[in-house]
Image: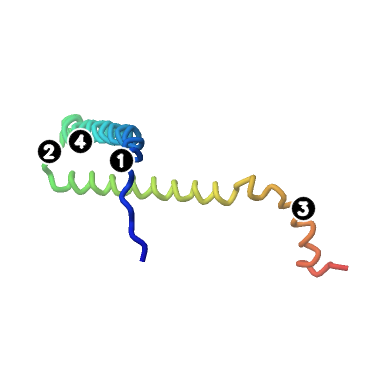
Amino acid sequence: MTEVQPPEPLELLRQTPAAVVVGIGCGLTLIGLSALAEAIQRLVWDDLTDALGVDADAWWWIVLVLTATGAWLAIGLLLAMCWLTLRWRLNRRRFAGWDHDWNRVEPQWSGRAG
């Protein structure tokens, strides 16, 4: 078994700026998502319940919000999967020469090969 050598100090120093950029990006993303979640929470549980005249602590309101959220996420996931599947199947670069291949294979496939 070969021994793993620790990285050279200069190699670590060279990778430091990239690590700092990734760390800052992750931190800013977390702050943005946290602010977005807080805004959505305030909208659903405060503003929307006040506008509809609903008690935010009612059991049926909680079930309705959670069910709607689950349905919204499921529909979004389904649409994303459909889009990715269609994108993969309709990749024009991958099927660029399909007509040439079909004209070569089709007579053998259909039994009309002469």
Residue sitting at x 33%, y 56%: 4
What is the number of the mark on residue 41? 4
Left or right: residue 58 compared with residue 19: left
Mark 2–mark 1 distance (CA, rounded to whole Å): 61 Å
Q: Earlier in the sequence, mark 2 or mark 4?
A: 4
**Neighbours of disc 3 within 10 Å: few (<14), some (14-19), many (20+):** few
Mark 1–mark 4 distance (CA, rounded to whole Å): 47 Å
Residue 45 placement (x, y as % from top left) = 17, 36
Give the quarter of the image for residue 37.
top left
Mark 1–mark 3 distance (CA, rounded to whole Å): 56 Å
- What amino acid is found at the position of numbered circle 1 in the picture? Pro
**Neighbours of disc 4 within 10 Å: few (<14), some (14-19), many (20+):** few
Outermost right residue = 114
Left or right: residue 44 compared with residue 58: right
What colour scheme has been applied to the protein in the rendered image? rainbow
Q: Earlier in the sequence, mark 4 or mark 3?
A: 4
Q: Earlier in the sequence, mark 1 or mark 3?
A: 1
Q: Nearer the viewer, residue 43 or 53?
A: 43
Q: Nearer the viewer, residue 56 or 109?
A: 109
Q: Earlier in the sequence, mark 2 or mark 1?
A: 1
Q: Nearer the viewer, residue 61 or 76?
A: 76
Q: Which residue is mark 3?
A: 100
Q: Which residue is mark 2?
A: 55
Foreground: disc 1 or disc 4: 1
